[in-house]
Image: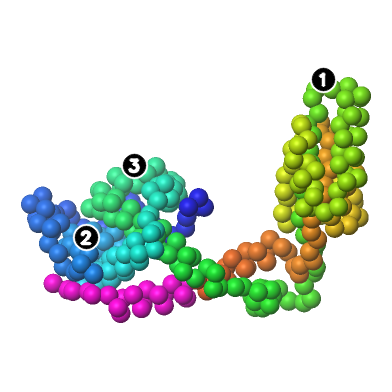
């Protein structure tokens, strides 16, 4: 899991003074840590777990401790146990690097370091482990939901069009062209003379004459020395400078543009795809991701509801 993680945990007003949150005496805390109040498929939740989560919720929601908040804390812990258990069934465990990244991000949003965040929570009677446990369960749950449902969820162009229209994108959507390109680039050495540059230009021209498609382009360029080949996906023509933009737009599919000098490099591009899309491609991609997350969220709620119904949950 390399991608950056997002959780629905909000840590606000961490330095607020909350009444009614006092630390447990050491002996009472030790007893609470071992006193089981709920079993979730034989996975225990202790008095200490519930008290810590209730304190954490009081800090993050600015609510005072109450029976309702205690129930909310208990339900949250039950769901997290079920999420972790489902992850184990699928061979998924929380990556501590991902957990640390989320924790660092949360601390940064509160203008703190992770150690300062831990200290601030500790001053209000909340062990940082409570927050880390919450993050772990959400990291695993995201992977569970994607593994179970991602292949079954498809967001079509019509879905995106409707969402954009509903969001106020009225009128006929403007069409944009996106390009899939392969770039060939040669960095010219500072001591290269005109003859050396001409030689490299001729080498690219020789390749260009043989390119018939992007498939044979990769074969033709794999052994050339000093050249870097890079795939460029979903490029807007406006992101390309001239004369490259004109050359690319005039090239046919599978063709390679003539080489050009750009600064201290020689560049040429093979055109692997041209696609017309309605509206701003970046906005469409953002809308598609939002719709995908919404649909996955609905599937996740249903899965968690079914898991809770099927689970053995014993209150003590």
Badge 3, how many Cα within 10 Å: few under 14, some, many 20+? Answer: few
Residue ID for mark 1: 191
Specify the quadrant that holds the C terminus.
bottom left
Q: Position of residue 62 (x, y in %)?
A: 32, 63
Task: Using the numbered discs, state the Cα–Cα distance from disc 2 to disc 3 in whole angstroms.
Answer: 21 Å
Along the line of sight, the residue nearer the viewer: 273 or 203: 203
Q: Is residue 40 above or below residue 243?
A: below
Task: Using the numbered discs, state the Cα–Cα distance from disc 1 to disc 3 in whole angstroms.
Answer: 52 Å
Q: Quadrant of residue 174?
A: bottom right
Residue ID for mark 2: 49
Residue ID for mark 3: 115
Along the line of sight, the residue nearer the viewer: 261 or 196: 196
Element class at badge 3: helix
Q: Residue at x 80, y 22 (%)?
A: 190
Badge 1, how many Cα within 10 Å: few under 14, some, many 20+? Answer: few
Q: Which mark is residue 207?
A: none
Residues at discs 2 and 3 in contact (Cβ within 8 Å):
no
Element class at badge 1: loop
Q: Residue at x 91, y 55 (%)?
A: 250
Q: Position of residue 312 (x, y in %)?
A: 23, 75
Q: How many callouts does the rendering have?
A: 3
């Amino acid at each position: 899991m390399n991608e950056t993680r997002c959780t629905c945990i909000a840590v606000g007003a961490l330095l607020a003074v909350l009444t009614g949150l006092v630390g447990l005496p050491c002996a009472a805390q030790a007893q609470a840590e071992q006193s089981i109040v709920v079993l979730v498929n034989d996975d225990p939740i202790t008095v200490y777990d519930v008290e810590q989560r209730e304190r954490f919720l009081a800090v993050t929601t600015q609510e005072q401790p109450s029976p309702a908040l205690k129930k909310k804390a208990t339900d949250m812990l039950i769901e997290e146990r079920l999420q972790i258990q489902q992850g184990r069934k699928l061979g998924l465990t929380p990556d501590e690097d991902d957990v640390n990244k989320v924790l660092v991000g949360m601390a940064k949003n509160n203008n703190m370091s992770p150690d300062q965040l831990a200290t601030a929570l500790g001053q209000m009677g909340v062990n940082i482990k409570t927050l880390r446990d919450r993050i772990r369960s959400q990291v695993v749950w995201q992977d569970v939901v994607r593994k179970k449902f991602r292949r079954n969820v498809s967001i079509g162009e019509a879905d995106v069009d409707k969402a954009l229209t509903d969001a106020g994108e009225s009128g006929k959507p403007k069409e944009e062209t996106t390009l899939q390109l392969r770039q060939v680039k040669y960095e010219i050495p500072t001591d290269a003379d005109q003859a050396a540059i001409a030689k490299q230009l001729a080498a690219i021209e020789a390749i260009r004459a043989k390119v018939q498609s992007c498939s044979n382009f990769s074969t033709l360029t794999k052994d050339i020395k000093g050249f870097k080949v890079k795939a460029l996906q979903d490029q807007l023509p406006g992101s390309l400078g001239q004369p490259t933009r004109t050359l690319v737009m005039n090239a046919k599919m599978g063709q390679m543009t003539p080489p050009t000098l750009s600064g201290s490099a020689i560049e040429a591009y093979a055109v692997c795809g041209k696609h017309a899309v309605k509206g701003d491609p970046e906005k469409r991609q953002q809308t598609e991701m939002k719709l995908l997350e919404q649909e996955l969220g609905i599937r996740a709620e249903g899965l968690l509801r079914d898991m809770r119904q099927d689970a053995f949950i014993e209150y003590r």
